[in-house]
Image (cartoon, helix red, strand yellow):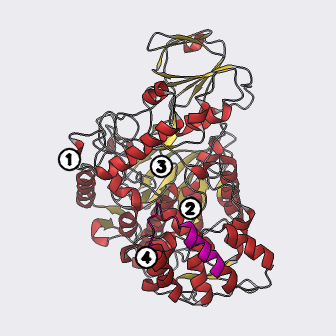
Amino acid sequence: MTVINHDQPTYVVAPVAGIDRADLVAAIDVADPGALLAALVQLTGDTGLIDEFAGKLAAYESALGAYPDPVAAEVRDRARRMLGEELVPRITAPDDELFRRLAEICVNDTVDAEFVAHLREQAGFEPARRVVPVTRRPPEDFTVAIIGAGMIGLNAAIKLGEAGFRYQVFEERDELGGTWSRNIYPGAAVDTPSHFYSYSFELNPSWSKYYPTGPEYLDYLRGVAGKYGLLPHLAFSTKVLGCAWDEQRQEWDITVRAADGTVRTHRANAVVTATGVLNAASIPEIKGADTFRGEIMHTAQWRPDVDLRGKRVVVLGTGCTSVQVVASIADQVNALHVVLRQPHWLIPERNVFAEVPDGMKWALTNIPYFHQWFRLKSYWWAADKGWPVARIDPDWYATHVSASPANDAVMQFCLSYLDRALAGRPDLKEKLTPDFPPFAKRIVKDPGFLDAIQRDHVSVHRASFAEIRPDGFVTTDGEFLEADVIIWATGFKLEYLGFLDITGRDGVKLADAWAGQDPRAYLGITVPGFPNLFVTAGPNAAPNHGGGHNITSEEHVHYIVESLQHLVENGYTAMEPTTAATDDYNRRVDEALDETVWQHAGTANGYYRNSSGRAWVTCPWRLVDYWTMLRAPEPRDYHFT
């Protein structure tokens, strides 16, 4: 059991007594050795284990922090001998230097001091530290409107509630969960590790797989909402039509349409948009679509009543959704055509299918601090270790497809995987080998796609749709293929609040301020002329080199809570960033992006860049840098009233 100790910024992990020895041994046999060793140090208080095993690890070369078998075996043996029927931590709050050393032994890599505070929070060792003084409680009538009940919206509700702010969540759908209630296509799953892709303050030791399915992740979010008492604050089937700032009252008027069709206006002191940016399905406009006699559906509008068994099916696209669908339906259909305009770089991930062993679940639940260390290790190798890969070496890039030696290492890894997985199928390798550097568009983890496309009844076409006919379609290569079902796995239209009518100070509309597909925000969150409007997952806020949407969620919500507390502490009613601060921040964003494959993507298409070619999605900073920027608002960068 984990509880917050409000006297110090750490979580207190309760001792575990009366454990079954057989359960402990079974858990040790399958537990990650790095996380197990770090937990063992805290349980026994024997810090000498750090240097001892660091020396043993130094004798080996390993990839991604993997422990060599002999060292892993020795860690397990030591744990069996040192742990008894009571697991009582001797070290509960290591100082920063000891924590850094423990992190290094856990991940089997160098961990610099700049990461310590960030890792403590993200691994779940402690809650986000409050920075703005908390000497005043928010006024009873201070209300925050949250638009959207997905991962970020629920997070905002929890943290605003804990900070004493009243809030109301408006959700257009009849279910919480955002992406994970909307995407129910076959094979829908998270492509970020389960034990990291969750709230740092709500760890889940019961994940069934190392990469969760969509339904399991939705169950997790439902459980969180229930635990924190959010449901009474959620207005489902309530669409926000618009928000307008009232300068005289210093409040937002929020117009909503309820489930019964009635239109009402609510008032709030602040608005948090938690709608995400990938909402509207991107459906190609193809000549003849209305003549097709079969079924056509987008993966985001999946109809479970459509029976694919024995059908001739075509899937357009090869992104994350497409590979999941193809791998899942290949064995059901009579014929399957995969049509792609441009391939993604594919990487293998052995744990995509892997179930979490019972012993591992037991360790995550019962061995104090093991879960936090395992989360830290999962995060470490999926986060800022990928940041250098997106950086450009101009001299290298001038003569290579890859952008730098680090980028090339990833490309060679991907090419090697294609060679192994498609041995004997040079035709498929040619069709699925990109001609742009890795990270220029999203890298895809293979859930069995390459195996599926080698089946006799599956074909791959490097083309697009030219025309749809009643009984099939014609590709841009002029080939006609019969089909009973067409599946658009073509992703979403990227929208930065273009679907909301938001009017700020002096009647300025956000759609006009962000006209020309070039939205700009200060820190990706606040916008000049729009007081107390906090845009989560805003422009240039996505960590496309690693991490996940969950870290953006927590960082943005923390910044919002700190900002509102700053208003309360200083007796202000509203805040908005200065134009100078916003312009300066975005100048630095553009300068940093100019050194990356996100901006200079070669032939890569996709939503990372807007219609003019500017990288408008990606945050150029390391996760630890962006996290540091969002600890608290900088007063000199804001106007306060």
Decide whether residue 188 is among the magenta residues: no
User: Residue 162 or 477: which is nearer the viewer?
Assistant: 477
> Quadrant of the image for the N terminus?
bottom right
Question: Marks 3 and 4: CB-CB under 8 Å?
Answer: no
| Disc with the residue nearer the chain's start (1 vs 3) | 3
In three-dimensional space, the C-alpha distance between marks 3 and 4, rounded to whole angstroms, equals: 40 Å
In three-dimensional space, the C-alpha distance between marks 2 and 1, rounded to whole angstroms, equals: 34 Å
Name which residue type carries label 1: Pro
Q: Quadrant of residue 496?
A: top left
Residue 243 tag number: 3
Residue 129 seen anywhere in this rendered image of the structure: no
Name which residue type carries label 2: Phe
Q: Secondary structure at mark 2?
A: loop
Q: Which stretch did the figure color magenta?
A: 58-78
Left or right of 265, for residue 346: left
| Disc with the residue nearer the chain's start (3 vs 4) | 4
| Dot 1 crowding, Cα within 10 Å, few <14, some 14–19, many 20+ | few
Residue 394 tag number: 1
| Dot 4 crowding, Cα within 10 Å, few <14, some 14–19, many 20+ | many
Q: Secondary structure at mark 1?
A: helix
> What is the x, y in percent for residue 3?
65, 79
Decide whether residue 70 is among the magenta residues: yes
Residue 564 seen anywhere in this rendered image of the structure: yes
